[in-house]
Amino acid sequence: MTIGGSFPNRRPVLLLLLLPLIFVTIIPSVYATCQLSFEQDNKVYNYSLTNPIRNFPHGILSEDGFYKVAANGTVLWFQLCDAMIFNHDPPTCVECGDCGGTSHCGMGCSALVANIVGGYPVCTTLGYSSSTSLELIDKKDPLKGITAKLSNRESKLNCSLAVSIACDTNGVQGPQTLELVGTCDYATQIHHPSGCAVIISSHGNGMGWFGTMLIIILFFFGVYLLGGAVYRYYSLGIRGIDIIPNLEFWASLPHTLQVLNSAEIL
């Protein structure tokens, strides 16, 4: 009988082992552009537009799938940190090629503006969620909130949208005003609890390089033990406590340390 010749459950086990790593590395990168953290006056200010908060399980994301504001014949749709979804009131545009096309207009980008040209609404893509950048509304007062800027550098006009997210713990107020600050640069403002910073005192609480290194070592040690145990269980057919790799070494380690300690004392 060949013990290690077949390993029918190898792929599920490997996926199970890699799943935490995939979640830790890939998932945060999706929303990394919607996070901002900095230290000032021994305090760490953390902003995360996608973190669930009380009464807002999706963070800054509009539950309608989009925000909408109109002024002076111009209509603007946007969604922060994600692409827009239209279950009602979709944009109808003459041109929408880089934001979903005519049949799915608005669903291929994160910000879209329509201007009436010759009696028809002509749409321009202002930005995508991947191009979002965050900065403080007021650098002297971090508690006021942050500004999310979406851009479309592929456009000949280099269009953009700046959404000021004012900190408001009482609820949400959608965009009320729309301002054109350049040839193709728009600005608006909303009030939302996601614009409020989570403040942590950094005085004396930093882990430093030693704490970070210790966490990394413990992580890889855990991966080594788990991976070795799985291999010995499935490939070598070992059962019981002996599935722990290098068990004899770990069992003798306390005695070895005691001997070394006694030698140092002498």
Image: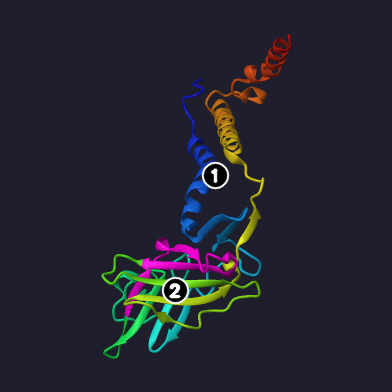
Percent x, y for residue 52?
A: 60, 63
- The answer to whether residue 88 is seen in the rendering is no
Considering depth in this image, is 223 or 206 the residue closer to the camera?
206
Task: Give the quadrant of residue 183.
Answer: bottom left
Which amino acid lies under the numbered mark 1 shown in the image of this protein? Pro
Instruction: Please rate how many residues cluster around mark 1, counting C-alpha atoms within 10 Å: few if below 14, some from 14 to 19, many from 20.
Output: few
Q: Nearer the viewer, mark 1 or mark 2?
A: 2
Instruction: Return the residue at label 2.
Output: 78
Q: Is residue 126 magenta?
A: yes
CA gap between label 1 and label 2 equals 32 Å
- 58 relative to 74, above or below: above
Residue 165: give its label: none
Instruction: Return the residue at label 1.
Output: 20
- The answer to whether residue 155 is seen in the rendering is yes
Instruction: Please rate how many residues cluster around mark 2, counting C-alpha atoms within 10 Å: few if below 14, some from 14 to 19, many from 20.
Output: many
Display colour scheme = rainbow
Residue at 33%, 84% (x, y): give it: 115
- 154 relative to 246, above or below: below
Contact? badges 1 and 2 (CB < 8 Å): no
Which amino acid lies under the numbered mark 2 shown in the image of this protein? Phe
Q: Is residue 223 magenta?
A: no
> Which of the two discs, 1 and 2, labels the residue nearer the N terminus?
1
For the magenta stretch, what is the residue range?
123-151
Residue at 51%, 43% (x, y): give it: 21
27 with respect to 52 (left or right) = left
Percent x, y for residue 43?
A: 62, 55
Percent x, y for residue 111?
A: 40, 72
Considering depth in this image, is 120 or 236 the residue closer to the camera?
120
Percent x, y for residue 179?
A: 42, 81
Q: Tag 1, which secondary structure?
A: helix
Q: Tag 2, which secondary structure?
A: strand
Residue at 50%, 83% (x, y): give it: 176
